[in-house]
Image: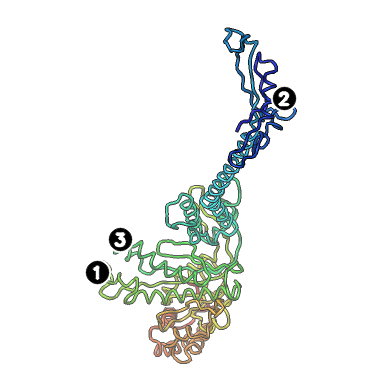
């Protein structure tokens, strides 16, 4: 790796130059070829061209990094021998060696080493960035997207079902996956806890950068309000004790499922009662005919009819509520085979203020309006009229023409706190099929609208006596006109055909208190004395 290019021996005079000249002219006979060769014939070293005759030539031909200098502090005596002269540094010998080959190899190795290090670092950084992308960056981005989506659409999907780890088990306890699930669950709890009425609260607090502000102005909306109550709840609670919570939740699940199937929203659970809401002109994903008042009233009616029918099915053999009939405490309280879970329901439409109720310690998202109270009063009046469902006149008027044909008016009253008379209507269920009001779809996946002239409605009113609605209208016309004796006769005819008709029995009881004579000043309606 090193080649001699210059030598200087102290005290040798021109002897060093003679050595170099001799090296230039040295020749020998090649043992293989028999030809005479000189140092110039060497493959990688030619003294003729490589050996310099002066230091100046070295500095001109070589860079400082391309040669090395070897030196020795030796002084020669007159006899030509060498001897150490103590503490004498004035004499010395040195030689220059060409190290360009070694430098080139070292440079090449450094280049390869640099390239190798770059490859290792690049590969390592790619692997690290891939893991960081998969385990940190993408999960954080998904979490940010989830929060933004929750702020923009509080009632939309939180993405809990879409969370999965890439290249691993979706159920593994990875920290970022756990964090994503936690955020998604918090979003779902917000949706369930606040409901549709609290969507604005969630959106406002998720989108701003300040602190939590649950208290805000309400919003005036129009909606259908449905109130539902479990009958005999006090007695049932005393019988079931701790198990009453599961009991209520099973009934609530039936009502809520039917409500959400038909585009409504559960709002409040008040012990044995539920408040359900169908917002008019709101955004309802997949709603076939939009969220008009008529369409939402139709949906609310279907949902309540479905709740009554599904509850009847679950009361029967194999149903989730059938077990309560065999509860010893219930059997003692209600008698053998007499217990059946029933609901009272009222439907009304009108305006309300949607917002938060409470304080910084506890808030509920709900609705404040006389119209909400009206739905509650209608539900309470179902006991008096011996029917599971009452509809207000405003609600009836907003129904589609096909839906109105399935209902009948059963009275006209004024309620407490109002002087405006209001007609009361009901929708009869004569037969209880195994299913009713299930969502139906076209081949392209579009949801079908419910047909009130279809098989489902025919099935539940299949046992209705002939011309029943027309006969009942004759009786009600006589009642409104003050011809109570005529009304009595017509209602008695109806009871011969339909002996357990609750509205007919209730109306006969009302008229009987006045000996079937309309009170003086009768204007076609009465005051509803019960709440």
Quarter of the view holding residue 254: bottom left
Tell me the residue at 69%/27% (across/down).
64
- Mark 1 or 3: in front is 3
Whole-percent x, y for residue 465 in the image: 44, 90
Mark 1 sits on what residue?
A: 332
Query: Disc 1 versus disc 2: distance between alpha carbons?
Result: 129 Å
Q: Earlier in the sequence, mark 1 or mark 3?
A: 3
Whole-percent x, y for residue 47 in the image: 68, 31
Query: Disc 1 versus disc 3: distance between alpha carbons?
Result: 15 Å
Foreground residue among 219 and 30: 30
10 Å neighbourhood of mark 1: few (<14), some, or many (≥20)?
few
Residue 508 vertical placement versus 342 (above, below): below
Whole-percent x, y for residue 370 in the image: 54, 64
Q: Earlier in the sequence, mark 3 or mark 2?
A: 2
Mark 2 sits on what residue?
A: 53
Foreground residue among 109 and 522: 109
């Amino acid at each position: 790796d090193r080649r001699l290019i210059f030598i200087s021996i102290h005290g040798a005079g021109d002897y060093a130059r003679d050595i170099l000249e001799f090296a230039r002219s040295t020749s020998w006979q090649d043992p293989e070829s028999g030809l005479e060769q000189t140092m110039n014939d060497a493959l990688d070293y030619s003294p003729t061209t490589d050996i310099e005759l002066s230091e100046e030539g070295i500095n001109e031909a070589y860079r400082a990094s391309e040669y090395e200098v070897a030196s020795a502090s030796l002084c020669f005596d007159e006899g030509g021998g060498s001897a150490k002269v103590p503490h004498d540094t004035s004499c010395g010998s040195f030689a220059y060696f060409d190290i360009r080959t070694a430098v080139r190899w070292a440079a090449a190795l450094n280049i390869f080493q640099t390239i190798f290090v770059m490859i290792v670092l690049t590969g390592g950084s790619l692997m690290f960035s891939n893991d960081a992308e998969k385990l940190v960056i993408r999960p954080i981005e998904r979490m940010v997207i989830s929060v933004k989506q929750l702020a923009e659409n509080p009632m939309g999907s939180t993405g809990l079902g879409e969370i999965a780890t890439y290249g691993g088990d979706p159920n593994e306890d990875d920290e970022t996956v756990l964090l994503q699930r936690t955020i998604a669950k918090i979003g779902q709890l917000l949706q369930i806890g606040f409901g549709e009425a609290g969507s604005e609260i969630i959106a406002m607090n998720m989108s701003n950068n300040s602190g939590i502000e649950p208290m805000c102005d309400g919003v005036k909306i129009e909606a259908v309000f449905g109130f539902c109550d479990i009958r005999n709840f006090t007695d049932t609670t005393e019988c079931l004790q701790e198990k009453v919570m599961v009991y209520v939740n099973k009934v609530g699940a039936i009502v809520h499922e039917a409500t959400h199937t038909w585009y409504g929203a559960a709002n409040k659970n008040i012990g044995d009662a539920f408040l359900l809401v169908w917002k008019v002109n709101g955004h309802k994903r997949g709603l076939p005919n939009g969220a008009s008042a008529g369409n939402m009233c139709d949906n609310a009616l279907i949902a309540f009819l479905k709740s009554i029918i599904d509850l009847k099915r679950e009361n029967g053999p194999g149903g989730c509520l059938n077990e309560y009939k065999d509860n010893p405490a219930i059997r003692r309280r209600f008698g053998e085979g007499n217990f059946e879970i029933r609901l009272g329901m009222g439907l009304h439409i009108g305006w309300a203020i949607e917002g938060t109720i409470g304080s910084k310690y506890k808030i509920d998202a709900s609705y404040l309006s006389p119209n909400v109270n009206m739905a509650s009063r209608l539900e309470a009046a179902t006991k008096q009229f011996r029917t599971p469902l009452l509809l207000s006149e405003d609600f009836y008027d907003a129904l589609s023409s096909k839906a109105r044909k399935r209902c009948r008016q059963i009275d006209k009253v004024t309620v407490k706190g109002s002087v405006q008379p209001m007609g009361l209507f009901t929708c009869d269920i004569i037969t209880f099929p195994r299913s009713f009001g299930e969502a139906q779809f076209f081949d392209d996946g579009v949801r079908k609208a419910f047909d009130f002239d279809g098989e489902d409605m025919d099935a539940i009113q299949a046992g209705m006596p002939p011309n029943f609605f027309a006969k009942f209208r004759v009786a009600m016309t006589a009642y409104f006109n003050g011809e109570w004796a005529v009304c009595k006769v017509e209602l008695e005819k109806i009871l011969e055909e339909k002996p357990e008709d609750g509205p007919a029995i209730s109306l006969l009881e009302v008229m009987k208190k006045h000996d079937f004579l309309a009170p003086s000043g009768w204007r076609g309606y009465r005051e509803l004395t019960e709440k």
